[in-house]
């Protein structure tokens, strides 16, 4: 049964001054939030003020009506060297903007209470953090609203530098990781700029419409150059292999709520740009027609395998991490592979799974990172080898982390299961068995590593130094619990989120998924999460009845003690095993890392470091004016010839 379109909340009509549209007011509200952070960021009430600012932005986003109605063009326009810059929102823009503002909202909420006090005690001022967060939201709203390639590039650069600011605010290791990110971002920007020069040389404009009209006449050779430049440039932010090495340390070392924001949405800006160019404008059909010479591999298959490798290698790298922040940051890279893989399949289920996973992963990763930083708030460490047994001390945080890891692993009844299931089904229906196996291998690695995460933090013996640890303050728990509730509800009732995805598919010209309140009805595979979750909880109920109603006698053991093999172990016997977790597994598969994979990573890192050193040398010792003139001459010659 088809679920009727879910109406957005009815809002009062908004009086508009002059020719301004709700989209212009959305941009103005985002800019006002940034100004507010700059002026009042030092106040103790800065956090709640920022939350209100993001709330106003979300209301104005709903006012645009672009998810259900026609695309909206902003009245704000500029002209640079005779080229007009414009912004417009459609369903795709609305979808990414909704996640961006939502991530900013919960991050500011998390930052506004107890965390802000801890941040101050460490010698940091909250104003720069709030400024960086607001700058990220504003730049991302401009990027997803770009109406042409020139505004896309400007938005891309604004996002890159805003991200750098958020990464670097804490200084120290975070600043070093941010500087490494800049090297990658600079190389990616040059690749995108080169692609724009090629596009202008072919079409004579930066218009999306002109490029889409010219696609049938563009040769495969020119398109291959665009694929290399744009996938390389946009893939830096998305974290595609082998352009991913900067992301984990940069995101992990960013201060708590900033890390949650970046992990939730920042990398997805690369996915947004790839969708705009290669799904909406070039079209997946053309990618299928572009075969690598002397092979049977098309451009789409090549990108699918890059996505699959991006799932596998970062996921198993996460398995080796002993810092909870790094473990989750590495998973962020791998989850982007699922999103891209589903979109490249191109079927109704595949593209729906890829898009839905953007939303599901955003709420999941934000909740997980907030839970980890709540543990750090109380214990002072995220080292998995120095934690354990915190379940009875921080039970609410444990529940948040449990819900999050179930969703991240793609298991029912949480949100991540639905989107991953759609990707799996699409790969099977599209007769891509090897890619299906690759995605399942990635999921296996995810399950192993998230078990390590929850085991080493919350299960087993409590360490003596953490006996007095208390639950995180309400100011940290509230956004975590809000996200956990959304994760559960989006898993049981995926219909509302799928209704957004269906509108995005329609805007992109893709096959539209047939959804219900509980899931999907399709010849390629149907699922009803309401029934599935009902059966699942019925099974839990029977198990609980058997255990508590008919089970044998039990004896409660204090958490500082333990019980194993018929013996009671006291606190002086360290039975809880957390150090070097999965040592046996690493012994079996460690050769993959010590051999080819680590060699590849080392080669890429050395190459990037060499290029970075050379770039620094050029900027320091070569006359900048001559350098810019030479670069401009080369680009002009390329366009003219």
Image (spheres, rainbow, N blue to C red):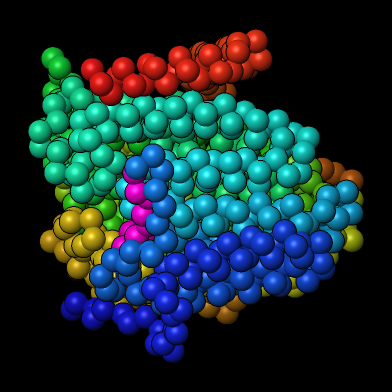
- Above or below 626: residue 224: below
Q: Quadrant of the N terminus?
A: bottom left
Residue 61 occupies quadrant:
bottom left
Count of labels in the image: 0
Left or right placement of residue 611 versus residue 91 in this view: right
Provide the residue span drawn in magenta. Answer: 83-94
- Asked whether residue 598 appears in the rendered view, the answer is no
- Above or below 436: residue 559: below
Q: Nearer the viewer, residue 267 or 362?
A: 267
| Residue 629 image point, x, y percent | 47, 18
- Above or below 121: residue 108: below
| Residue 395 image point, x, y percent | 71, 67
The verdict on residue 474 being magenta is no
- Asked whether residue 13 appears in the rendered view, the answer is yes
The residue under the point 16% across, 49% down is 429
Q: Quadrant of the C terminus?
A: top left
The residue under the point 46% across, 79% down is 17
The residue under the point 74% across, 52% down is 128
Residue 154 occupies quadrant:
top left
Left or right placement of residue 38 versus residue 501 in this view: right
Q: Nearer the viewer, residue 551 or 456?
A: 456
| Residue 562 image point, x, y percent | 78, 53
- Above or below 381: residue 45: below
The residue under the point 58% across, 62% down is 31
Q: Nearer the viewer, residue 422 or 616?
A: 616
Left or right placement of residue 249 versus residue 421 in this view: right
The verdict on residue 84 being magenta is yes
| Residue 263 image point, x, y percent | 56, 49
Residue 293 occupies quadrant:
top left
């Amino acid at each position: 049964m088809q679920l009727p379109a879910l109406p957005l909340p009815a809002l009062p009509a908004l009086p508009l001054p002059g020719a301004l549209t709700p989209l212009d007011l959305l941009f103005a509200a985002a800019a006002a939030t940034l100004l507010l952070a700059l002026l009042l960021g030092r106040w103790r009430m800065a956090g709640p003020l920022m939350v209100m600012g993001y709330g106003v932005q979300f209301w104005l986003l709903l006012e645009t009506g672009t998810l259900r109605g026609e695309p909206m063009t902003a009245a704000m326009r500029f002209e640079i060297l005779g080229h007009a810059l414009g912004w417009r929102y459609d369903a795709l823009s609305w979808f990414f903007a909704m996640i961006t503002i939502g991530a900013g909202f919960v991050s500011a909420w998390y930052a506004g209470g107890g965390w802000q006090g801890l941040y101050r005690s460490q010698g940091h001022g909250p104003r720069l953090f709030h400024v960086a967060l607001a700058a990220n939201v504003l730049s991302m709203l401009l990027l997803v609203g770009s109406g042409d390639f020139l505004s896309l590039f400007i938005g891309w650069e604004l996002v890159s530098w805003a991200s750098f600011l958020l990464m670097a605010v804490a200084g120290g290791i975070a600043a070093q990781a941010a500087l490494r990110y800049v090297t990658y971002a600079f190389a990616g920007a040059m690749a995108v700029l080169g692609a724009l020069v090629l596009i202008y040389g072919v079409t004579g404009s930066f218009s999306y419409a002109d490029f889409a009209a010219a696609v049938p006449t563009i040769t495969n050779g020119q398109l291959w150059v665009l694929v290399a430049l744009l996938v390389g440039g946009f893939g830096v932010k998305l974290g595609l292999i082998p352009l991913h090495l900067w992301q984990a340390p940069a995101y992990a070392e960013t201060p708590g709520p900033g890390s949650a924001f970046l992990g939730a949405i920042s990398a997805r800006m690369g996915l947004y740009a790839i969708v705009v160019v290669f799904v909406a404008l070039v079209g997946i059909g053309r990618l299928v027609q572009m075969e690598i010479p002397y092979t049977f591999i098309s451009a789409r298959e090549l990108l699918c395998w890059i996505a699959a490798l991006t799932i596998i290698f970062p996921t198993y790298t996460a398995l080796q991490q002993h810092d909870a922040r790094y473990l989750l940051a590495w998973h962020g890279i791998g989850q982007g592979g699922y999103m891209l893989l589903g979109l490249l399949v191109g079927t109704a289920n595949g593209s729906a799974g890829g898009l839905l996973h953007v939303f599901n992963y955003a709420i999941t990763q934000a909740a997980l990172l907030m839970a980890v930083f709540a543990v750090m708030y109380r214990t002072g460490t995220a080292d998995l080898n120095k934690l354990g047994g915190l379940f009875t001390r921080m039970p609410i945080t444990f529940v948040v982390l449990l819900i999050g890891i179930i969703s991240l692993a793609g298991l029912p009844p949480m949100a991540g299961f639905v989107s991953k299931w759609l990707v799996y089904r699409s790969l099977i229906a599209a007769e891509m068995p090897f890619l299906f196996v690759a995605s399942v291998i990635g999921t296996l690695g995810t399950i192993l590593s998230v078990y390590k995460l929850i085991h080493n933090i919350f299960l087993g013996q409590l360490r003596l130094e953490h006996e007095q640890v208390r639950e995180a303050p309400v100011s940290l728990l509230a956004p975590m619990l809000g996200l956990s509730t959304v994760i559960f509800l989006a898993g049981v009732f995926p219909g509302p989120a799928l209704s957004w995805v269906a509108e995005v598919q329609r805007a992109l010209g893709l096959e539209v998924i047939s959804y219900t309140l509980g899931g999907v009805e399709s010849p390629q595979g149907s699922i009803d999460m309401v029934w599935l979750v009902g059966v699942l909880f019925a099974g839990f109920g029977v198990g609980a009845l058997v255990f508590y109603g008919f089970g044998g006698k039990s004896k409660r053991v204090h958490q500082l003690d333990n019980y194993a093999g018929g013996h009671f172990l006291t606190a002086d016997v360290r039975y809880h095993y957390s150090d070097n977790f999965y040592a046996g597994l690493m012994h079996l598969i460690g050769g993959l890392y010590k051999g080819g994979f680590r060699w590849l990573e080392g080669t890429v890192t050395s190459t990037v470091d060499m290029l970075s050193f050379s770039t620094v040398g050029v900027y320091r010792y070569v006359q900048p004016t001559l350098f810019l003139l030479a670069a401009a001459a080369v680009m002009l010659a390329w366009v003219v010839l």
